[in-house]
Amino acid sequence: MFFKVPHRSSSCVECMYVNPITGVIQVALCHGIVYEHTEVSRKAIINLLLNRQMSLGLWYNHNVQSAYSKHKQLDGNTEVLPIAFAAVLPF
């Protein structure tokens, strides 16, 4: 069950869908690539949904990109989704 994160101005993220129960997010970046990330912090996802002032790009870079690059989430997986438009999310 995915929830669409309400749109906020972002130069990085076009749209994002999250599942706080499974820790999966699907994110369409502004440059056209769509990713699915697993094992994202459920606490961070809930915080994103509750805090409507939080920047999507900053949240994504801090909670997903940096976590994967620092190997904090050893069980997590990143996959490029084979879709061309954010309108078909969640996939």
Image (cartoon, rainbow, N blue to C red):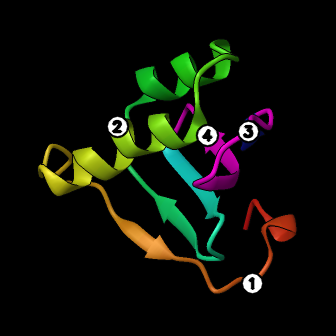
Confirm whether residue 85 shows in the render: yes
Q: Secondary structure at mark 4?
A: strand
- Give the residues in magenta: 6-23
Dot 4 amino acid type:
Asn
The first of marks 3 and 1 along the sequence is 3
- Please name the residue that numbered disc 4 is placed on: 19
- Disc 3 on helix, strand or loop? loop
Report x, y in % for residue 5. Answer: 73, 36
Tell me which residue sits at (67%, 48%) in the image: 16
Distance (Cα) linking label 3 and label 4: 21 Å
> Which mark is nearer the camera, 4 or 1?
1
Query: Disc number at residue 62?
Result: 2
Chief secondary structure of the magenta portion: loop
Q: Amino acid at mark 3?
A: Ser
Q: Is disc 2 surrounded by few (<14), some (14 to 19) or many (20+) residues within 10 Å?
A: few
Was residue 79 drawn as part of the magenta stretch in this picture?
no
Residue 15 is a magenta residue: yes
